[in-house]
Image (spheres, grey):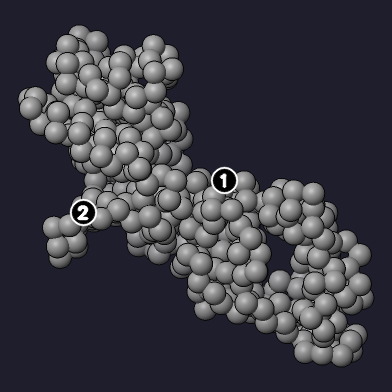
């Protein structure tokens, strides 16, 4: 049996609030339409909505809020992050509902629909603001309401755990300080909290500070030390938790699950999962198919130009690294001479930092037709077929060559935690001006900030980047 961790208690509370507020907001739109002095007069009967519309509103809004991460506590640590995701989720839910209404129920007053949107969005934001104020108030008036946490270990792992506690104060945690074996750290302050003593004093300090929980955040190599700390704390009436030192191993995010009663931590899990992945894949298929139909004739002309311009095949197939390191054959229009791959070693340049540059201006292997295709990224059009097959997505980090991936540093491999794309954040922020091995920061920005809205933003910015032809060679 496999059991994954689900909603946090706070997420479940927010979800329950939203279900109620969306329904209330739709009901409230009826008296608002009658009471506010705008638009044509309308009878009370004309504002009554069928029950099916309430179900439609709940499905559209809750789904959109979930896709935008309104219930993902790791994405809404700050109030402005939460407000942004709620507003974007509300806008997306409204668009979904507008499309559904167009196909089903067109008698809803446009003003009433607008009142529903603004009223419900305001209610959702107000509820979250009130919940934050409530937690802040009871944290001040009832100090015992929060669990007092002592962190064993003031290294990278301990400070990361402390930052999570500080950001997620709504969970009911209060950090009281750190312990560390490094004598130089004792007395120092990290994130506003001091290192109060050595690890060997964990039992006495936990009692003196009336600690409710101790979080052990020691490096994995300190296995014996962890055992000793656990043995000391088992004598005391408090809870003990261990934070595994997997952060240096995890590619992007880790998930805990139970398999047959054994706790496992997944270190190489996809970032885009569930409904968000379904939406992204559906969008990829629809847009890629439409573009292939529209561009069929221009692609035929490009194929003819390649055939007449130089000897060799029209399409170029090359092994690339996709999501999670999976290899696939990527398609491109051929832009180089037929022996280009065998001559790769003669054009590679190694930088002073030891990095390999394999794509340079003035490459003698590029044909005349190929130079034009590369300038405007027309050589990438056959990859729409890779998108349809599921090897790639429309948006994501560019698929890399396997021999270059072998030269990656461990942190650079995090870019493979999402589907590799036809265009991406790097492509609209410099393209080939920046060598591929220096684009990982841009790729990780996309990985850590993925949303459907970011995909749309990149797609809308791609035509301008292509027309400028900046950095393309």
Identify which residue is drawn at 17% across, 11% down. 208
Q: Residue furthest top?
A: 141
> Left or right: 341 with respect to 189?
right
Residue 52 x, y percent position in the rendering: 24, 56
Alpha carbons under labels 2 and 1: distance apart: 30 Å
| Residue topped by disc 2 | 263
Residue closer to the observer: 295 or 196: 196
Residue 221 x, y percent position in the rendering: 35, 43
| Residue topped by disc 1 | 445
Identify which residue is drawn at 71% across, 71% down. 380
Locate the C terminus and report the quarter of the image it occupies: bottom right
Query: Element under label 2?
Result: strand
Residue closer to the observer: 144 or 14: 144
Q: Residues within 10 Å of mark 2 (few under 14, many from 20)?
A: few
In this rendering, does residue 108 appear at all? no
Query: Element under label 1?
Result: helix
Q: Is residue 390 above or below residue 256?
A: below
Residue closer to the observer: 295 or 212: 212
Q: Residues within 10 Å of mark 1 (few under 14, many from 20)?
A: few
Residue 196 x, y percent position in the rendering: 31, 14
User: On the image, which quarter does residue 318 sit in?
Assistant: bottom right
Q: Is residue 399 above or below residue 296?
A: above
> Left or right: 164 with respect to 84?
left
Locate the N terminus and report the quarter of the image it occupies: bottom left
Q: Is residue 454 above or below residue 111?
A: below
User: On the image, which quarter does residue 140 sit in?
Assistant: top left
Mark in the foreground, 2 or 1: 2
Identify which residue is drawn at 87% across, 90% down. 311
Labels 2 and 1: the sequence-earlier one = 2
Residue 471 x, y percent position in the rendering: 82, 55
In this rendering, does residue 444 appear at all? yes
């Amino acid at each position: 049996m496999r059991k994954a961790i689900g909603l946090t208690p706070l997420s479940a509370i927010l979800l329950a609030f939203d279900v109620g507020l969306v329904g209330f907001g739709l009901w409230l739109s009826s008296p608002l339409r009658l009471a506010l002095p705008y638009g044509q007069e309308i009878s009370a009967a004309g504002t009554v909505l069928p029950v099916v519309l309430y179900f439609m509103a709940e499905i559209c809004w809750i789904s959109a809020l979930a896709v935008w991460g309104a219930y993902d506590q790791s994405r809404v640590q700050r109030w402005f992050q939460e407000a942004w995701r709620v507003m974007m989720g509300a806008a997306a839910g409204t668009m979904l509902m507008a499309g559904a209404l167009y196909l089903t129920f067109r008698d809803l007053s446009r003003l009433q629909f607008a009142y529903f949107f603004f009223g419900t969005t305001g209610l959702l934001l107000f509820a979250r603001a009130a919940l934050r104020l409530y937690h802040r108030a009871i944290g001040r008036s009832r100090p015992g309401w929060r669990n007092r946490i002592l962190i064993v270990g003031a290294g990278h792992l301990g400070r990361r755990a402390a930052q999570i506690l500080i950001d997620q104060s709504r969970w009911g945690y209060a950090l009281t300080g750190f312990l560390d074996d490094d004598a130089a750290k004792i007395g120092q302050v990290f994130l506003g909290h001091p290192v109060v003593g050595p690890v060997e004093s964990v039992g006495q300090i936990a009692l003196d500070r009336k600690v409710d929980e101790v979080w052990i955040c020691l490096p994995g190599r300190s296995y014996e030390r962890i055992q000793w700390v656990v043995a000391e704390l088992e004598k005391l009436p408090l809870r003990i938790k261990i934070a595994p030192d997997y952060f240096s191993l995890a590619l992007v995010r880790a998930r805990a699950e139970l398999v047959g009663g054994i706790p496992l931590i997944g270190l190489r899990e996809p970032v885009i999962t569930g409904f968000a992945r379904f939406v992204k894949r559906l969008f990829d298929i629809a847009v890629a198919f439409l573009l292939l139909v529209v561009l069929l004739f221009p692609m035929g002309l490009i194929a003819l130009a390649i055939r007449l311009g130089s000897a060799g095949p029209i399409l170029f197939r090359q092994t690339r690294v996709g999501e999670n390191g999976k290899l696939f054959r990527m398609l491109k229009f051929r832009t180089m001479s037929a022996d280009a791959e065998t001559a790769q070693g003669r054009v590679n340049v190694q930088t002073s930092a030891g990095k390999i540059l394999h794509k340079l201006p003035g490459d003698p292997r590029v044909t005349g037709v190929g130079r034009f295709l590369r300038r405007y990224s027309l050589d990438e059009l056959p990859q729409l077929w890779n998108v349809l097959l599921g090897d790639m997505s429309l948006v994501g980090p560019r698929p890399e060559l396997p021999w270059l991936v072998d030269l990656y540093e461990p942190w650079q491999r995090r870019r493979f935690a999402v589907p590799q794309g036809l265009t991406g954040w790097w492509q609209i922020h410099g393209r080939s001006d920046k060598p591929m091995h220096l684009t990982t920061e841009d790729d990780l920005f996309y990985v850590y900030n993925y949303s459907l809205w970011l995909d749309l933003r990149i797609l809308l910015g791609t035509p301008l980047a292509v027309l400028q032809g900046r950095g393309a060679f």
